[in-house]
Image: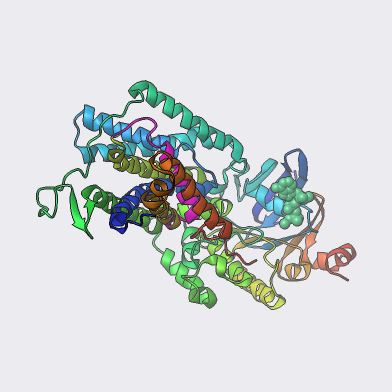
Amino acid sequence: MNWNFDVLPDFIFNGLSLGAIYGAVALALVLIFKATTLINFATGELAMLGAFLVYVLHMEQGIWLWLSMLIAMALSAGLGVLIERSLTRPFDPADHLPVVLITLGLFLIINAVAGDIWNYQVRILTNPFGKFPDWVPSVGGDRYVEVLGSRLKYQSIGIWVTLALALFLLGLILNRTKAGLAFRAVSSNTESARLVGVHTGRTLGFGWAIASAFGTLGAVLVAPQLGGVNPNMMATILIYALAGAALGGLDSLGGAVLGGILVGIIQAVFVTWGGVVVFGQLYMSILQLAAAFLVILIVLLFRPAGLFGTRRVERV
Amino acid sequence: MVDDVFDEVGLKVENLHASYGAVEVLRGLNFEVASKGVSVILGANGAGKTTTLRAICNMCTTSGSVVLGDEDITRTGTAEIVRKGVAHVPQGRGTFPELSTMDNLMIGAYTRKDNEIRDDIDRWFEIFPRLSERRDQLAGSLSGGEQQMLAVARALMCRPRLLLLDEPSLGLAPLIIEDLFERFTTLNKETGLTMLIVEQNANLALEMADYGYVIESGEISLSGSADQLKNDPAVQEAYLGA
Ligand SMILES: Nc1ncnc2c1ncn2[C@@H]1O[C@H](COP(=O)(O)OP(=O)(O)O)[C@@H](O)[C@H]1O
Ligand SMILES: [Mg+2]
């Protein structure tokens, strides 16, 4: 076996940046799961739609990239509110099947509509972190810095910083605002939340809004790694994000992010050694997928609530 | 139409029906709660006590009428009923286990817009020092008694005019129950808060209540002043263990 440690940092860096994206999408899943114990299978497609909004605003209309992202996130949030209000609220929250079917239906519809409008070809979207800005002193190249003999891409750094800022902002919203407190209360005990006067429907809409905006951010950041935007861009990412959320604990926001990052690293490590060495190039991605899920299954076997899932500590 | 039993009515329930699916659980309840008084509803397990309180707050399918003061709240949504001054401590306390003690109290004041919320929290921490010591602890990690105190304090954070308590004694040690009921009495005497308590523990409940009702299979089978009920042979046999 060829244990080539020199390439390890490369893959860890890649794993960490892809993992951060999984973490962002996992966070979008967990935000809604915490409040409703529902998996929103349309999370990835909503994010893809958000990325296409950025494509339209920035590439077609020429609006400044970051402004396009903010507008797209706001529109995604609005769409999230609309979906909660019109498609999920009419159904009994205790009966999960109809709402899960609706999110699956949304998955298919959004994908088909996007495919119809933009076809299924990859469209280039400007990388927000393509080249270092001019004010950064040159260390290595204009797209990376040398760390431990490996290339740490500006793109990875950009993804980490952006998501860290977004997480910090989310933490402020959830922990320092009244709407955030209401959201945490609904997540903890919906019936009691209603009994203190919280309008639970509106509060869930607020959760959908934040989750959708987060998903869009994730999709825009991951697009350059996929060569651009396309209607199927989020399919595998959603699966890895789901795995990350399960690994971290479906009811833990911090766990979702860490779970996503862990999945990214596990995946990268299997690319480094597992795939190439054992089965050769051809089977690499399949093995990678299978091996990553095997690790997750083993963890869940011993910790069914996930690594950071807080199973309710309740004494009566 | 029922004649008003009390000079001033805090809550008036007429011909209240409630059902879960096809099963009718309340079959035409009529009762009143005196303004500033303490009323109790006694009943065995499954008689429909919890459903009665839930029906008042419009948390299940109902028909009939519920009037708070002089306002009909039968069709008012649960969250709006809270804004009209009804606080409900549900069976099993209904705290927010993943929220800290402090946040549980803060969310209790969700409907308020004044700037005395912090003062109120400090007052409850003074009344319940145990809660003050555990202000940053998750509610789910508090003991049963502490959670009940928290549930009551949280309910009162909205400054209600009617407090509904669903079996507050359930699962608590006798000493803690006594302490809790003493506090309820003090609260009523000092603030004139109207209370409706649902209990299986008839001894204590009748001790502090002015007026009581007995509910059996979704109907009021008996009513009277607390003293009348205490001396009623049927009540003594069924609920006082005489
Ligand atoms: N969510 C529910 N679904 C169906 N039946 C219920 C539900 N809650 C209570 N019941 C039934 O309604 C009746 C009254 O229940 P409840 O009001 O909880 O009684 P109590 O509080 O007096 O013990 C019981 O027979 C109970 O089985
Ligand atoms: Mg009950």
One can see residue B111 in this view: no
Does residue A100 belong to the magenta stretch? no
For residue B201, above or below residue B68: below
**Where is residue A182 shown, x and y percent of the image?**
46, 53
Please state the total of marks drawn on the protein image: 0
Q: Quadrant of the N terminus of chain A?
A: bottom left
Q: Quadrant of the C terminus of chain A?
A: bottom right
| Left or right placement of residue A229 versus residue B56 in this view | left
- Residue at 78% over, 67% down: B202
Q: Which residues are magenta?
A: A228-254
Q: Is residue A86 above or below residue A204?
A: above
Residue at the extreme front of the image, as rendered: A1
Of residue A128 and residue A84, the one placed in the foreground of this image is A128
Residue at 47 percent of width and 63 percent of height: B103
Seen from the viewer's position, the closer of residues B84 and A10 is: A10
Q: Vertically, is A118 above or below B87?
A: above
- Left or right side of B159 for B51: right
Where residue B130 sits: x, y (%)?
54, 76
Of residue A118 and residue A141, the one placed in the foreground of this image is: A141
Q: How is the image coloured?
A: rainbow
Q: Is residue A9 visible?
A: yes
Q: Position of residue B90 (x, y in %)?
A: 63, 57
Q: Is residue A231 magenta?
A: yes
Query: Above or below — where is B174 with respect to B225?
Result: below
Task: State the image quarter where residue A8 is shown.
Answer: bottom left
Q: Residue at x 43, y 29 (%)?
A: A110
Residue B71 placement (x, y as % from top left)? 59, 46
B191 or B242: which is nearer to us?
A: B242
For image coordinates 69% across by 68% down, the residue present is B169
